[in-house]
Image (tube, rainbow, N blue to C red):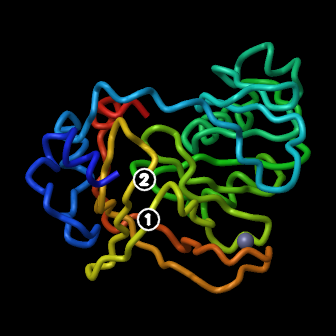
Amino acid sequence: MMSYATRETRFYRDHHSTKELIDLPRVELLDYLRHPEGFEVESAPVHPRQELAYPIGRPPRTAVLGQEIVSGIRVRHFHSYRSPRLAQFAPEALAAPSDTIRALAQSIEEGEIQWKPLRHALIVFNDVVRGALSAEDRDYFWKVFQVPVFEQFRGFAGELLGQECEAHEGMHLQQANVIVEQASDGQLLFSFLRNPRTPLFRMATNLTGRLAYGRCDCGSSTPRLLDVCRRTATPVSRRHLAVVNL
Ligand SMILES: [Zn+2]
């Protein structure tokens, strides 16, 4: 992916002799959001739709919002939580971006929509722009939905980067898709390995957190990302969100 990036993108063209990831310069998240064209490969194929990564076993009847996934009988994509087809589907689990789930939770609390309670799980999609769930988010989602919350981190093409398991001890990293480093200033640096349209390395995310390498209670020993939170209160504006089409 590194040699591809140095061949195909404007930003990495000057780094064609770099052999090691660690020798590439950091990219600040806001610099990327302001000038995505320097990092993008327009001719790259669109990332294929993916299966939903359900956290435990086979998915029950699951509705997915805001993320194009491979739909089947049990897992279906809907454009809005207001869709009458979604109400008919009567999902037992829901997967959606964190801000969509916040909006849905408010609509339910205000009695604005009729919502049949979930039975299994709430899967929350987050990313380096949205940041991770806070303890308050989790409490709020539990209060409204009353099912376990499983967070998933995704890349700019929707590729899975990390997912929470039933032990709820951080997100297991998908090592084929991402490398996460902890910089000396405490920031998490993300290198995206499975996004040929935007090959980005060592992106400084303004997020802090810690990496755990021990065996998780779920039995897996893949590295986990824990306690992720935003380093400063600098909000990312809506205009920037529009640029990356999240
Ligand atoms: Zn685990």
Q: Compared to 85, does 160 lie above or below? A: below
- What residue do we see at 28% from left, 26% from top? 42
- Ligand 1 image position (quadrant): bottom right
Please tell me how crowded label 2 is: few (under 14), some (14-19), or many (20+) other residues with Cα within 10 Å: many
Q: Quadrant of residue 81?
A: top right
Quadrant showing the C terminus: top left
Q: Which mark is residue 217?
A: none
Distance in Å between CA atoms under marks 1 and 2: 8 Å
SS at mark 2?
Answer: loop
Nearest to the observer: residue 77 or residue 25: 25
Q: Can you name the residue that lies furthest to the left here? A: 14
Q: For the point 46% across and 74% down, which residue is it?
A: 209
Residue 120 x, y percent position in the rendering: 88, 48
* Residue lying furthest top: 84
**Within-10-Å neighbours for mark 1: few <14, some 14–19, many 20+:** some
222 and 8: which one is in front?
8
Q: Is residue 34 visible?
A: no
Give the quarter of the image for residue 68.
Answer: top right
Asked if the residues shown at circle 1 and circle 2 are in contact, with their CB atoms under 8 angstroms apart, the answer is yes
Name the one closer to the observer, 2 or 221: 2
Counting from the top left corner in percent of width and height, residue 87 is at 84, 21
What kind of element bears circle 1? strand
Does the rendering let one see residue 160? yes
| Disc 2 target residue | 193
Tell me the residue that label 1 is attached to: 179
Q: Is residue 190 above or below residue 98?
A: below
Amino acid on which the number 2 mark rests in the picture: Leu
Q: Quadrant of residue 76?
A: top right
Please give the name of the residue rendered at 71% of the width and 25% of the height, measured from the top-left corner: 77
Q: Amino acid at mark 1?
A: Ile
